[in-house]
Image (cartoon, rainbow, N blue to C red):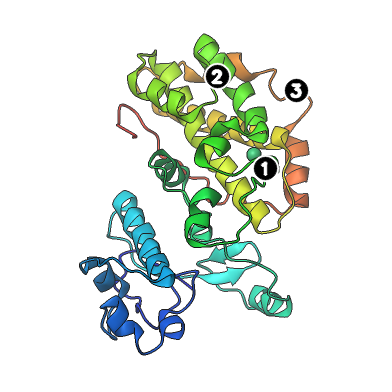
Amino acid sequence: MKAVGNGRHTSFWYDKWSSLGVMSEMLGERGFIAMGIRREATVAEALQRRRTRHRREILKQIDMELSHIAANQEVEGVGADDVDMWRWNSGYKPRFSTQETWRMTRVSAAQCDWGGSIWFSQATPKFAFRLAIRGRLATMDRVAVWSQGVDTTCVLCKRASETRNHLFFECSFSTQIWEPLMKGILRNSYSGKWEELISLLATSPMEKKKQFCFRYTLQATVYMLWRERNRRRHGEQPIHATVLTKHIDKAIRNKLSLVQSKGIGGLEVSLQYWFGLTDDLVDGLTDDLVDIMRRQWAMDIYKDWVVPVYVGEEMV
Ligand SMILES: [Zn+2]
């Protein structure tokens, strides 16, 4: 599997860059003409061609996959190189493990590919957040458009269809995390509705420390929920909402300590502000306990927990 960056080192026809499969195997000899893409083309080249409207469902799906990549490039830039992704139990990763691959070939092919979603499982919070803003996360309502018969039920609450607005944060599971983190910050303007939150973010004047905590919590929560959703779709053990809340809280504390130590203007007081808001939030759930749970479930949540600081930079 290839994770496409700029697409220059990935063959459109012969590499597996899409969860749909290898294009040459799917479309055969007639594919070159049907798609209007030459045999030697890279994915980068395919992205640049003029689009034609296809009638066949499979061709439409392929175009959709290309659009995903184009969207990806739009947010990440086109500088990134393509990466070979190896199949691990928890999804595709850029690292190869013989042991893991061996294990994977031993299990029956019960694991499904969930469209483009696995590509985003390694995403930084910033990336997941931007895709969410643009409505481009591969939520099941969107996947269902090109992949008939998939189960669109939300894996977090199992009670509703999964859409972006459901995940962020109308879902009862998401609410369990979002509400305790956010109520103290937003008080009377508290909301769990995506559109309202984004409009609040864009239009409402706030004190700097408050705005920072709001933005950062929103970003981190979107990331954590998206990640938990991906984990569950790949059959991993669910993590309790309280533990996820604690993780987000801890990540924010770490970030605020960093901001404080760097003396970034106007944000030095944010840490005390955050402590004041959330100290009773995670009563009884000590760091030790979280660590034990983390080890038990072999979570790798901290691994790519690298978040940029936004100070006065437009995020949307
Ligand atoms: Zn739900």
Q: Quadrant of the C terminus?
A: top left
Rendered location of residue 279, percent (x, y): 66, 18
Locate residue 25 relative to residue 31 in the image: left or right: right
Find numbered disc 1 in the image and state the secondary structure of the residue it sits on. loop
Residue type at tag 2: Trp
- How many C-alpha atoms fall within 10 Å of the one at disc 2: few (<14), some, or many (≥20)? many
* Residue that appears at 37% across and 32% down: 310
Name, please, the residue furthest toward the bottom: 29
* Residue that appears at 58% across and 48% down: 227
Q: Is mark 1 within 8 Å of ligand 1?
A: yes
Q: Is mark 3 within 8 Å of ligand 1?
A: no
Q: Confirm or deny contact between disc 1 and disc 2 (CB under 8 A).
A: no
Determine whether 108 is above or below 64 in the image: below
Q: Earlier in the sequence, mark 2 or mark 3?
A: 2
Residue type at tag 1: Leu
Locate residue 232 relative to residue 194 in the image: left or right: right
Find numbered disc 3 in the image and state the secondary structure of the residue it sits on. loop
Locate residue 313 relative to residue 247 in the image: left or right: left
Q: 9 or 153: which is nearer to us?
A: 153
Which residue, given by chain and number where applicable, does mark 3 sit on? Answer: 283
Q: CA distance from mark 1 to mark 2?
A: 27 Å
Which residue, given by chain and number where applicable, does mark 2 sit on? Answer: 274
Q: Confirm or deny contact between disc 3 and disc 1 (CB under 8 A).
A: no
